[in-house]
Image (cartoon, rainbow, N blue to C red):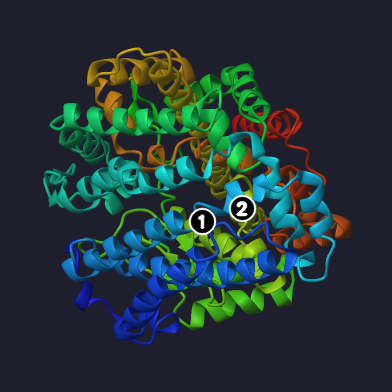
Amino acid sequence: MNEVLKRDQMEEKYTWKMEDMYATNEDWERDYESSFKEMDELANYQGKLSASPETLAEFLNKYAKLAEKVEKISVYANQRYHQDTGNSFYQDFADRASNVENRFESKISFMTPELLAIEEETLKEWAKKDCLTFYKKFLEEVTRQRAHVLSEELEQLLAETSDMGGAPADIFSMFDNADIRFEDVVDGEGNKLPLTHGRLLSYLSSSDRTLRKNAFVSTYNAYYAHKNTLASIFKANLKKEWFYAKARKYESSMAMNLDNNNVPVLVYDNLLASVHDHLPLLHRYMKIRKERLGVDELHMYDIYTSMIEDMDKEISYEEAKEMVYEALAPLGEEYRSHLKEAFENRWIDVFENKGKRSGAYSWGSYGIHPYVLLNHEPNLKSAFTLAHEMGHAMHSYYSDKAQPFLYAGYKIFVAEVASTCNEAILMDYLLKKADSKEEKDYLVNYFMEKFRTTLYRQALFAEFEKITHEMVQKGQSLTAESLCKIYHDLNVKYYGEDVVVDSDIDMEWARIPHFYTPFYVYQYSTGYSAAIAISRKILSGDEKAKEGYFKFLQGGCSMDPISLLKLCGVDMSTREPIDSALKLFEELLDQFEDK
């Protein structure tokens, strides 16, 4: 089926049941309206937090309750918006939810400065009292960033700028999800096919080289036509980050963003250093790919297709669900019972429709089950995406069940671990089931591609971010041309001499949504490395590691990210997990070449 359906044409069982969050839009409106009154009540505590531990506890109780409500308001509005970004009714909901979040941040902006105005020793003594024991970890986290918190007046001013600060991301999102138009593409048989975000990867993975090339060129032509606008949006986002970093007395935008997750900059530097040391393995992989595909020149549009012919099996969504359910048996029946609940009770929005947000994610609001957005295609990639997003969903499910609201939200640094662990376990399951050398090679090819796309490619993105943010911090000029050159040179460096780095790829920086959540993408690489280590332990029957993994899933943000991963026997403050993961990549290359 080539036609992309409208939202109201989608079969209900394949759409998420947002009524589990709010039965009606009117219920959302009631929470929306009441939140403003509750914000005003919170604001009345301004100047009073140091009065007594009892007053502080009273404030924090109300703060936590309202923060939970604001999250629910935001998640519902944005998920409704994401299911059809062209729907003006839910565009309005999303805009209003953003206003609620910004107003909330503004109203409570006095909180952190007032807490830090209390002597550190006094705050520690207060935290021992019954009324504040629950908030001990929360207060410790506030104190940790004491050096980067400003005066009450300046904190309020920064909170007031948050709406403007979000503008580059909002503008890009509207352009990329609602306004950009791609020319139809022609396949090798002359058929004209619609090109969308959701279909691009499917086309690039096709064995039809004509389709691959045309989809590749059409995609980047669409972005190239707006290169100067996109460069301006991108640069505005970098400048915004540097403004906040300077305001908060950080030495760099990277330091600020990593500190928000309590992750040392050394982790970022270790990742890039390890990847640089192992670039010869990626170059070797590209050489193998060129030979296996039998092409005179290996182009950027050739690097997603399988090297194994006639193995692109069609996998329906129903088959993908069954595959994921069976594969995750090593995690136990209790874990799988929650998977089944998600599959049967519409936690998942499955197929692409017109205006739907591209990609996939898991999100939700505390106290309600997590949700998953997909743009499912009938292929192996989408089956792995299902396993990946259900890993996120189960992480949130376990964390929400084990932790109170304030400690349930896990840091982004560990967010990709559970998702990627699921993928690695699914891969092991499929490799064991494979009944031919050809099928095993196909899966090893897929596994190697995960290393390329999740570890190497995300590291390339991370290096691009590091370079461009540092340029802004040094006052250097960034234009569409300079951004394209930086990106081109990185692709040459990463992919090596056996790949023709087509000029079209130079515009890829302009279509990466995660660049508008700065210094996020490196965590795919670190998370992938940690997940490979954890999955190997679980699959080997290491019950202690499995027990540690479930403690990790339940941990939320009750511990810092590095300590949480140590529960699973993984130390991300060293290069060892990255080096170890890339050692497995080398073993896969050896296995693939072994004929």
Task: Tell me the residue at 67%/64% (across/down).
Answer: 56
Q: Is residue 356 visible?
A: yes
Give 485 or 238, whichever is nearer the viewer. Answer: 238
Q: Say what amino acid the circle numbered 2 marks.
A: Met
Q: Which residue is mark 1?
A: 384
Q: Say what amino acid the circle numbered 1 marks.
A: Phe
**Image coords of residue 22 (percent x, y):** 40, 82
* For residue 536, side relative to residue 234 (left or right): right
**Image coords of residue 25 (percent x, y):** 30, 82
* For residue 552, side relative to residue 387 (left or right): right
Q: Where 464 sits versus 310, above or below?
A: above
* For residue 497, side relative to residue 132 (left or right): left
- Distance, label 1 to label 2, CA atoms, is 9 Å
Pointer 1 with pointer 2, Cβ within 8 A: yes
Q: Which residue is mark 2?
A: 427
Earlier-in-chain disc, 1 versus 2:
1
Q: Quadrant of residue 77?
A: bottom left
Task: Tell me the residue at 47%/66% (across/down).
Answer: 71
Q: Where 549 sits versus 590, above or below?
A: below
| Quarter of the figure that contains the N terminus | bottom left
